[in-house]
Structure formats: structure tokens, C-alpha cells
Amino acid sequence: MNIYVGNLHNNMSEAQLRDLFSEYGKVLSVKIIMGMETGQSLGYGFVEMDDRADGQRAVRKLNNLNFMNMYLEVSEANPRPGNKLPRASGEGRKNKGPHNNPRGNNNFSRN
């Protein structure tokens, strides 16, 4: 089961998030989404749990939990259309920037 976790503290680590969810069952993966420009946490992430029942129990117990002085927003993640799992920022970007210009014109002056 893939779980969305929002309103994360900026200093929260993936290890801390894993530990929090591990109390409810086997955690397969943890990903805190980082800003492409800053490298800082965007305040949300995803946890994938092995067992659906364990995931649902974690959602019930951890939603609105005050953790690191932030009230967590925990819910089942909704897949993006055409994808199995939600997309992290920056994945699947097409034709963004001069390096992907289909005409090969990158708008840079050449000497």
C-alpha cells in the first residue's frame, strides 16, 4: 500500500519516517520529496507498506499525529493517471529546458 504523508517537518529524515511507520508493519520504501532548486524537503513524502491492512492501520493511527510539532496528514496515496504510483517531482518531465528542444535550437549564442 502506498501512503501519502504531508505536513512533514523540514528536518525530518527518511529514517525517522521509516521508524514511525515500522511500528505498524513492514515498510518497503520511504521517500521524502525534495525541491529541485533548494534540495530542501517540500514537506511531503510517500511510504510504501507491504501489507494493506497494516497500511490502513498506520493511516488511521498517524493521521493528525503531532510529530516534531507538526500535525501529520496521512492518507492512502492516489496514483497519477497512467502510472502505478504517484510521481515524485521532476520525474517524467518532457521538453523542459533547452536540452530537450526538438528542433535542436537551444537559444544560446555561439562564438
Image: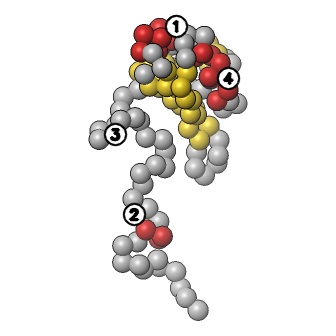
Mark 1 and mark 3: span between their CA atoms?
28 Å
Mark 4 and mark 1: span between their CA atoms?
16 Å
Query: Decide: marks 4, 1 in contact (CB < 8 A)?
Result: no
Q: Quadrant of residue 67?
A: top right
Left or right: 84 in relation to 107: left
| Residue picked out by circle 2 | 95
Residue under the image location 52 percent in, 80 percent down: 108
Q: Position of residue 105 (x, y in %)?
A: 42, 80
Pick the quarter of the image with the C terminus: bottom right
| Residue picked out by circle 1 | 61
Neighbours of disc 4 within 10 Å: few (<14), some (14-19), many (20+): few
> Which callout, 1 or 3, points to the residue nearer the camera?
3
Q: Position of residue 9 (x, y in %)?
A: 64, 27
Secondary structure category for the residue under label 3:
loop
Mark 1 or mark 2: whose residue is earlier in sequence: 1
Mark 2 and mark 3: span between their CA atoms?
19 Å
Kindly identify the amino acid type of the residue bearing the numbered disc 2.
Asn
Residue under the image location 65 percent in, 41 percent down: 40
User: In the image, which disc is placed on residue 83?
Assistant: 3
| Residue picked out by circle 4 | 16
Secondary structure category for the residue under label 1:
helix
Residue under the image location 48 percent in, 11 percent down: 54
